[in-house]
Image: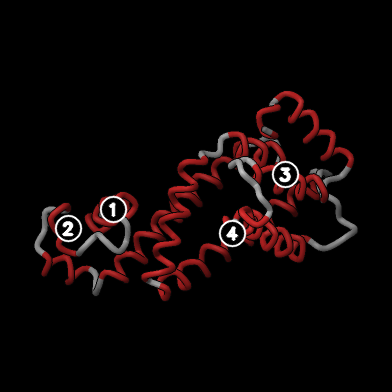
Amino acid sequence: MTNREQILRNTSALFLERGCKSLTMDDVASANGMSKRTLYEMFHDKAGLLRECILLMHKGNMVRMEEELAGADNVLEWFMRSLENKDEKRMSFYYDFFTEVKRYYPEVFMNVVQDVNRWHCELLERVIRQGQKEDLFITDILDAHQLSLQLFELSVAVTDRAVRNYLEIKHDRGSDCLMLFLIRGIATEKGREYIDEYLKNNKSLLR
């Protein structure tokens, strides 16, 4: 691990802990045992540092999700386990963090969100294609690319707090249930049987 990457890891934790507005470059320099001048030589400004930290966090999530997908027997197992192991408190924490980034650093937010969303759409398309090859997803409605865009747009909507409040979804699992029903809607008979059997053995997913 390079010194730059270690600084980014340390600073990412600080951003998440204190928020992007409150954390100063003085705080970052002090926490990393360096002068502010040296810090500015490495990172042009706070916005640039924040952007690199977010992209590093995203890279870590990408690696984790790719490893989990590669280790699953099929794409539905990967999807169901993702729901089952989802850390709602962590997700809420990240939501609050990115809400603050959007408010105080809109250019950084728009820049990184485009990269993150592009990757999620590409991953979703690969998952759909793999699921179609596994005879778990339908193939005669929309192609994988169009399906991935449609599902991603819907997933953003059902996980947005404003939408959840409007729909009076009170519990954290509400958005997961909606996503589950969306995935079940594009599943083949074989895929639906897999999902239903999984739910019978893991009823907490619907609570």
Residue at numbered disc 4: 162
Q: How many marks?
A: 4
Q: Which mark is residue 180?
A: 3
The first of marks 4 and 2 along the sequence is 2
Locate residue 65 relative to residue 132 in the image: left or right. Answer: left
Is 21 in front, or is 42? 21
The reply to whether callout 3 and callout 2 are in contact (CB within 8 Å) is no
Local secondary structure at mark 1:
helix
The reply to whether callout 4 and callout 2 are in contact (CB within 8 Å) is no
Distance, label 3 to label 2, CA atoms, is 42 Å
For disc 4, the neighbor class at 10 Å (few under 14, some 14 to 19, many from 20) is few
Q: Position of residue 167 (x, y in %)?
A: 68, 53
Is 78 in front, or is 172? 172
> Which amino acid lies under the numbered mark 1 shown in the image of this protein?
Arg
Quarter of the image where the C terminus is located? top right
The first of marks 3 and 1 along the sequence is 1
Residue at numbered disc 1: 18
The first of marks 4 and 3 along the sequence is 4
Residue at numbered disc 2: 27
Mark nearer the viewer, 3 or 1 = 1
Which residue is at 32% across, 61% downward?
20
Which residue is at 31% across, 49% downward?
17
Q: Quadrant of residue 121?
A: bottom right
For disc 3, the neighbor class at 10 Å (few under 14, some 14 to 19, many from 20) is some
Is 143 in front, or is 2? 143
